[in-house]
Structure formats: C-alpha cells, structure tokens
Image (cartoon, rainbow, N blue to C red):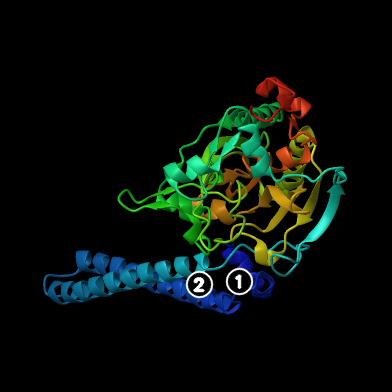
Amino acid sequence: MIDLRLLREDPDVVRASQRARGEDPALVDALLEADSARRAAVATADNLRAEHKAMGKLVGKASKEERPALLSQAQEMSVKVKEAEAAQHAADADLDAAQRAISNVVQEGAPAGGEDDYIVLETVGTPREFDFEPKDHLELGEALGVIDMERGAKVSGARFYFLTGYGALLQLGLLQLAAQKAVANGFTMMIPPVLVRPEIMSGTGFLGKHSAEVYHLADDDMYLVGTSEVPLAGYHSGEILDLSGGAKRYAGWSSCFRREAGSYGKDTRGIIRVHQFDKVEMFVYTTPQEADAEHRRLLAWEREMLAAIDVPYRIIDVAAGDLGSSAARKFDCEGWVPSQQTYRELTSTSNCTTFQARRLAVRYRDENGKPQIAATLNGTLATTRWLVALLENHQQADGSVRVPEALVPFVGTDVLRPAG
C-alpha cells in the first residue's frame, strides 16, 4: 500500500504515477475522501468514548436521586459509542479497500507508457552470426533428448513438459550455480513453501490485476506461488527487524506456478511461457534509504549470473504501465534468442519500496529506536527459461550444444549431442 502521508502531502505525485501506469487517477481522490472520512469517524468515536467515560464518573459521584437519570443518559451514550465504533470499523474497511486499489508510486526517472515503451540502458555482448540455419530451443531440446513437451502434455496438459537427462542436469546446474553465487554474496538460502495463505498473496500485490494468473486451491483457500518472492515477503510479516547491521538478504529456490491467463497464442511453443518452472529468486529487506542502492546491487548480481552462461543480453528500464502493482521501478535483463531474432526476459529485479512491507506489517527500528516501515526488493538469479537462450546461443552446426564452462561441473559434460 502507498504511504498515506505522501498522499496527504502531495496527491499530485500519486495522480501522476497513476497516469504514467495507465491507471485511473480518480482513485487518488477516492482514497483522499476515504482517508478524510476515516479520520472523522475516529475523532467522533474518540470524543464519544471520552464523554461516556466522563459520564461514568458522574454516575459514580451522583446522589441517589440523580443517578437514574444519569444512568439512562449513560445507556444512551453507550449506544452512540457502539454506533460510532461500528462506523469507524466501516471507515477503516473503506480506507483499506481504497488504499489497496492504488499501485505503488512509480519512481522518478522510470519511463511512462506501456509494454513497448521501455528504455534500453545497456547491451552486453553481440548476437552470434551463424554460418548455418539455427534451430529453436525445442527442436534442439527434442533432438538432444533434454525436453519432452509431448509427454508433458499427455501427463498434465498444454504448457507442461519434462526436462530429461542432461536437460534436468542443466536446470539443476543453473540453479545450483545461482545458489552458490547468492551465498557468496551474503544471501541466506531458503526452500520456501509454495502454498501460501490469502493474506500473504494479497500482501505482496499479486491479487490485483494479475490475480487471473494465480492458481487458487478453493477447498483450502490457499494459493500456489508464481515466485518465491511471495513466501519470502511473508517470512517476516508482522515482525520488527534488526537492520542495524545491513539488509536481510534471502534467496529462495522453488517451483513456481502461473496460469498464464490471457496469453493463449503467445509463446506456446517450447518452454518460454509455461505453467510450472523452477527459479532461484533474491529477496531483500532493507531501509527505504538504502533501497535504490540495493536495487543496483541486485542487478549487478544478475549480470554475474548471465555472464556465467555466456549469452548476449540487454538491460531495459521497464515502463510504468508494464510494472507490477508492487514495483516502483524495474530493470529486466533480456537474453538474445536467435530463432526469434529478438531479446526475451531472463531476469527481472524490482524495487517495491515500502509497498509490500506496509501491507505485511514488516518494520525495522531507526537510529532512534522508532519502528518504521521497511523496504523490499526482489530479483531473478536463474530460472528454467534460461535454457532457451542457453541452448540456442550455444548450438553447433552438427546439432550439438556447447555447455558453458561454469555449468560443466554440474552437468558432467562440456557438449550435449543429439540422441542416437
């Protein structure tokens, strides 16, 4: 949720953020009204409670003759207090709903616009020029015996797959390398639950406009996570953290699940856009003052991992209209995919400022010992989709694929060759 203090002091900043996202700026006025109504309801309830308390004291001091009338007045006042408290609870609920309807305030400097309005910040490496017709990752994967989409569909339906043999070892190698790099950079490795309660999913901001992409188990009222960002964000919910020694950094290794609602017809071939995949996700709790610097550090760690698999990529500053509701700023690293002659997302790192922590009541103590809302950030360190760029960029004319040197110890070979 956004900071109500910012809303009151500079509502135009929030309106501008809404317009940059392509969302309704009128929601800002609705929130201002809800905030004003809630404060008025609190004042009314507080005043009536004070009057009721004062009247109780009068009853205690009253003479026998005065007491019946005062008791009657006190009973009437008690009814008014209960009504005022009910009105306050309703106003609280209205304020919460209005506050949750507004996405995080976009950081100054982020480009306005939609999905295609990103800014390219840097291009790393040069796309390879092949002296043969390159195959796409699925054709390679099937020939190498590392991806089996047909049996994945037979067992689970469209957009499911088996990673087999060296395919499984490649993914495990990627994730293990990511885990090693995370630990080396001060992250605590975590294997989190992949089912979470509604308040945790909602707290991270995934039940807004992207709720159709989330798997919900109705009988249990639980959600399958699309990223370990969700359980890691909930890990310290309701707590006051000690950040005096620096940020708390976690790296979650988990399977992830996405319904991909509304994406039918897009990237249906292969493993670019699937319902289940594995990922190592960085997640950080820090102070709002340190959040921007931490965001740059997360991007740098993502670059280290991309360098290890030796694929060309570019870094983009994602436009406001393409940000998730929790993100104030997001940088994506997109790997070159030769078969598509374009760049596709491999990593994403977001600065969520205090938006998630405010919803999940995660705080820290400042230098004066006063509790303050923490900031949260996240970033991809490796995921199944990386196999697409890895296979396609390292393919050879004979159909084999070179294994990046950093992954050879995990895979057990430096070249993958077609089966048979």
Q: Quick one: label 1, few (<14), some, or many (20+) residues within 10 Å? A: some
Label 1 – label 2 distance at C-alpha: 9 Å
Horizontal arrangement in the rendering, residue 252 relative to residue 128 (left or right): left
Residue depicted at 74% across the width and 26% down the height: 415
Extreme residue toward the front, this view: 420
Q: Is residue 274 visible?
A: yes
Horizontal arrangement in the rendering, residue 199 relative to residue 332 (left or right): left
* Local SS, label 1: helix
Q: Position of residue 160 (x, y in %)?
A: 51, 45
Residue depicted at 49% across the width and 36% down the height: 192
Q: Is residue 267 above or below residue 245?
A: below
Task: Provide the residue designation for mark 1.
Answer: 8
- The answer to whether mark 1 and mark 2 are in CB contact below 8 A is yes
Residue depicted at 58% across the width and 27% down the height: 165
Q: Nearer the viewer, residue 417 or 160?
A: 417
Horizontal arrangement in the rendering, residue 254 relative to residue 294 (left or right): left
Disc marking residue 35: 2
Mark closer to the chain start, 1 or 2:
1
Q: Is residue 219 above or below residue 401?
A: below
User: Which residue type carries mark 2?
Assistant: Asp
Q: Position of residue 246 (x, y in %)?
A: 68, 36
Q: Quadrant of residue 399?
A: top right
Residue depicted at 61% across the width and 62% down the height: 104
Q: Position of residue 260 (x, y in %)?
A: 53, 56
Q: Quick one: label 2, few (<14), some, or many (20+) residues within 10 Å? A: many
Q: Is residue 114 above or below residue 338?
A: below
Q: Nearer the viewer, residue 85 or 284?
A: 284
User: Which residue type carries mark 1?
Assistant: Arg
* Local SS, label 2: helix
Disc marking residue 280: none
Q: Nearer the viewer, residue 152 or 202?
A: 152
Figure quadrant of the C terminus: top right
